[in-house]
Amino acid sequence: MMAGAAVATVGGAVVGGLAARRLLDARRQGTRSLLQPGRDGQPRWHVVTVYRPMDQLSQLPEPLTELGADVETRLRPAPDDRGTEIAARPRGAEQIHGEDPHRAVRGALRRAKQLVETGEVLQPNRPATTRRTVLNRPLEYATRHGREEGRI
């Protein structure tokens, strides 16, 4: 029994070490991030696919039009007739509505996708407990910041 636990511990350490090494190697090789400019020197595009044909999107959804001239947008058909791709990127502004331009674009794309596909921007439920406790603070944090980064 003890030997199995030791093997599992050593195996977990090896896997964790390999993952850390890959991250460090990628950093050393200068892997580009979304925040770095593309080859043309312009900010990178952020893209979402909405399950609606282009002819049903007569205009850009409201979350993207709110960003105004600070954002460049494109619409194109998604591969295999799977809807429409909405692409957006900041036009070099330092901030958009007091926020990091990439974060603002990603949030607007996330809200636009929800609006086009469901007709409303979905809001997370409030935590079940109304009293702040040590155990529900991580959930409060995740709910508050869950729409900022990550997959769109």
Image (tube, helix red, strand yellow):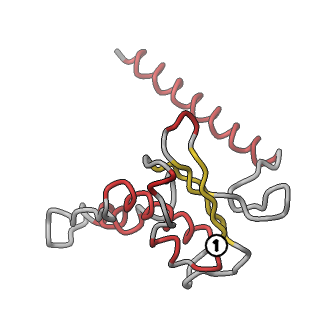
Most extreme residue toward the bottom is 98
* Rendered image quadrant of residue 116: bottom left
Q: Toward the viewer: 75 or 126?
A: 75
Please tell me which residue is depicted at 42% across the width and 66% down the height of the picture: 145
Residue type indicated by callout 1: Val
Left or right of residue 128: residue 72: right
Please tell me which residue is depicted at 68% across the width and 43% down the height of the picture: 23
Please tell me which residue is depicted at 30% across the width and 66% down the height of the picture: 140
20, above or below 137, in the image: above
Q: Position of residue 10 (x, y in %)?
A: 53, 25
Q: Position of residue 20 (x, y in %)?
A: 65, 40
Most extreme residue toward the right is 40
Look at mark 1 in the image and give the residue it sits on.
Answer: 71
Q: Position of residue 117 (x, y in %)?
A: 37, 54
* Rendered image quadrant of residue 98: bottom right
3, above or below 121, in the image: above
The N terminus is located in which quarter? top left
Q: Toward the viewer: 41 or 99?
A: 41
103, above or below 57, in the image: below
141, above or below 3, in the image: below
Left or right of residue 13: residue 121: left
Left or right of residue 61: residue 117: left
Q: Toward the viewer: 7 or 137?
A: 137
Q: Toward the viewer: 106 or 64?
A: 64
Mark 1 surroundings: few (<14), some (14-19) or many (≥20) residues within 10 A: many
SS class of the residue under badge 1? Answer: strand
Number of labels in the image equals 1
Please tell me which residue is depicted at 58% across the width and 46% down the height of the picture: 77
Q: Position of residue 85 (x, y in %)?
A: 56, 50
